[in-house]
Amino acid sequence: MLDLLWLIPILPLAGAAINGLLGRRFPKSLVTAVGVGAPLASLVLALGCLWEYAQGSFPNDAFERTLYAWTAGDLSIPVGFLLDRLSSVMLFVVTFVGFWIHVYSVGYMGHEEGYRRYFSYLNLFMSAMLLLILGNNFLVMFVGWEGVGLCSYLLIGFYYDQPVPPAAGKKAFIVNRIGDFAFLVGLFALFAKFGTLTYGQIFPRIAAQPGLVLGEYVPGFTLAAFVALCFFVGAMGKSAQIPLYVWLPDAMAGPTPVSALIHAATMVTAGVYMVVRSNVLYQLAPGVSMFVAVIGATTAIFAATIALAQTDIKKVLAYSTVSQLGYMFLAAGLGAYSAALFHVVTHAFFKALLFLGSGSVIHAMGGEQDMRKMGGLGKHLPQTSKLFWIGCLAIAGIPPLSGFFSKDEILHAAAADHHWVLYLVGWITAVLTAFYMFRAHYMTFAGRFRGTHDQEHHLHESPPSMTLPLWVLAVGAAVAGVVGVPKLLSFGLISNWFHHWLEPVIAQPQGLEAGEHSIGVGLEVGLVLLAVAAGVGGLFLARSVYGGDRGFARELTWAQRFPFLHRLLENKYYVDEIYDALIVRPLAALSRFLWKVVDTFVIDGAVKAGAFLTELTGDVGRFSTTGNVRNYALYFFLGVILLFWWIAFA
Amino acid sequence: MSSVPVSWYLLLAAALFAIGTIGALTRRNGISIFLSIELMLNAANLTLVAYARQLDDRTGQLIVFFVMAVAAAEAAVGLALFIAVFRQRHTIDVNRMNLMRW
């Protein structure tokens, strides 16, 4: 089964090609069969591979297989696939969550134009993400990295006949390019030093000889720090961290299952995966790691506050994703790589659940996304309501759901390193997270219906193809935390199986064996209680404001009391406007200058001058063509004389 | 047999060539131009033959045959053209054949 590892990314690619290139005359059922069949086959294969991987034992716990060498001149990059402890986790998440999103899409996109195009792109997206995580070197990862960028552009701009989605797609693509550029620079620096980009040839060498990357590379940065920083800027783009997060909320313009795919299983987790993959470098660059942690924490609380005042249900979820990604980078920056990846896993489940749940709501509301026009939907969509509730509990960190364990581990990491400021930021973010998620739940499902009569008449529970994935993901969101239950909470029965699973991947560089950061059991219990209090506190706070029939009336009074703060949050701190004024407009002005002045006068001018000269020469020269044969004879004669003169005297 | 010096042949050829050139450049009658060109060709032929004898090399005489053949072909084509022009315009004055100009 492991020999077929390479088929896992290829199958969705084949699905995309079949639907996209050959499917013009396919009946819809066949499009569905191909579009969902390919990810299903991938999932089955992945499960088989994982089973075999877990059974067998491999050198360095890694199964590696090179497919062929990608050669150009002296350069040879092996296109190889790697299944190790880290990529196995990602493989399961991507194929499993991705498959259920495909199933959901059958119901959600059933009545839409461009059904075939949609599934073709969706399969391509899966394929690119699987390539990203299964590659055994950075170049294959980069191919997948660009692939998900392309697919996000295609899918965000899926409704290309409307004004907003194509613009959002372009924004996503361009913002990602900024990060990609830094990522590439990092790759070049790494390649220049090691002459290879294969993980298995770089990381063990660094771990054995940290001195290789600790020389000063550019002023103020060692090679490790430089590469780590470049990679993190790349991750900022893909994983939506300050200051490159702006594309993610706009990505809501795509169909809802796409949002789920981007936010949960693919794309945004790529940055976290890459940082965890390169953990050796980050461990050798403590300054950059601290920077990662600070950016992560800032992003977490920044996005959480924006989410407080959003009224679009998908925007709330989008900012919550940005915020949760901030948590992951906080953990990664603190060196708690397994906690970061653990949060990726649990987040994939509950965020996919929440997005698909919101999709179910939007489907029932006939495309309406404004929560101010919802309310009381619990009666009409009982299943969606309950499942969304589970998702909220999970993301809010209410035990024993999955989000609690991963978030607690991150906060614990901050406390264990005595970074109390980061801990406090994380804790406040946890309260805010619980608050805005339950705010969204109450505004949507509780109280009275605030939409139009037509909408109320139209309300219906979604078809089974949509509710079944919700159920599956809800189970995942509820129990996924089991794999990472810390020793304390299981009363010593199991001690964080997930952490031990990842241990071989998280290499300790030579001479960096840090002492155990242990904090007393008493303090640890206190921290756990605090984490629970954050979730529960947020829940009850939201209930007291938005619960009952009053809807969001209280929010309006709050908004009136603090109009400035409310406007600031509602308008997302005006970041888009600031970027517009600082970057977009000067760039546009520069482009206009290049167009109107440089292009029109300099470049066109040169071409026109050439044309003018040619015309002038012709206008003058044509008078030599008299039509009189005796003139021509004279020219000829003079020419002959000239020739003789030249031969004789020159 | 006392031989004529080669310079005499060359001088005669040069004189013939000059007369031909002046005729070709100044005459307006197409037939006269042809005659002049023929004169120039034969001046060249005379040079070739003279050198052939001087240097005792038959190649010069050989080339003359080619030149005569080409001259005959050229005269045939040229005369045909002038006949065609004359049928249209009732003249072979080259000054009046100047339609192909700017």
Image (spheres, coloured by chain):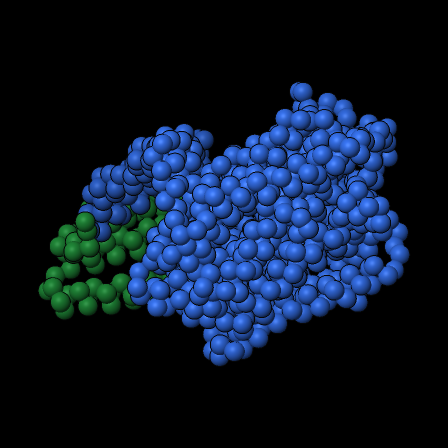
Chain colours: A blue, B green
Q: Nearer the viewer, residue A505 or A596?
A: A505
Residue for point 65% across, 61% down = A475
Percent across and percent down for residue B25 are 23, 46
Q: Nearer the viewer, residue A633 or A375?
A: A375
Residue for point 46% across, 51% down = A442
Does A129 sit above or below residue A542? below
Q: Nearer the viewer, residue A601 or A201?
A: A201
Q: Is residue A508 left or right of residue A474?
A: right
Percent across and percent down for residue A369 are 40, 54
Seen as rendered, the residue at the extreme top is A219
Q: Is residue B93 left or right of residue A93?
A: left
Percent across and percent down for residue A46 are 72, 63
Residue for point 16% across, 56% down = B99
Q: How many marks?
A: 0
Q: Nearer the viewer, residue A605 or A305?
A: A305
Percent across and percent down for residue A271 are 63, 43
Residue A99 position by quadrant? bottom right
User: Can residue A499 be spotted in the picture?
Assistant: no
Residue B34 position by quadrant? bottom left
Residue for point 30% across, 56% down = B38
The quarter of the image holding the N terminus of chain A is bottom right
Residue A649 position by quadrant? top left
Does A592 sit above or below residue A62? above
User: Can residue A634 be spotted in the picture?
Assistant: yes
Seen as rendered, the residue at the extreme left is B90
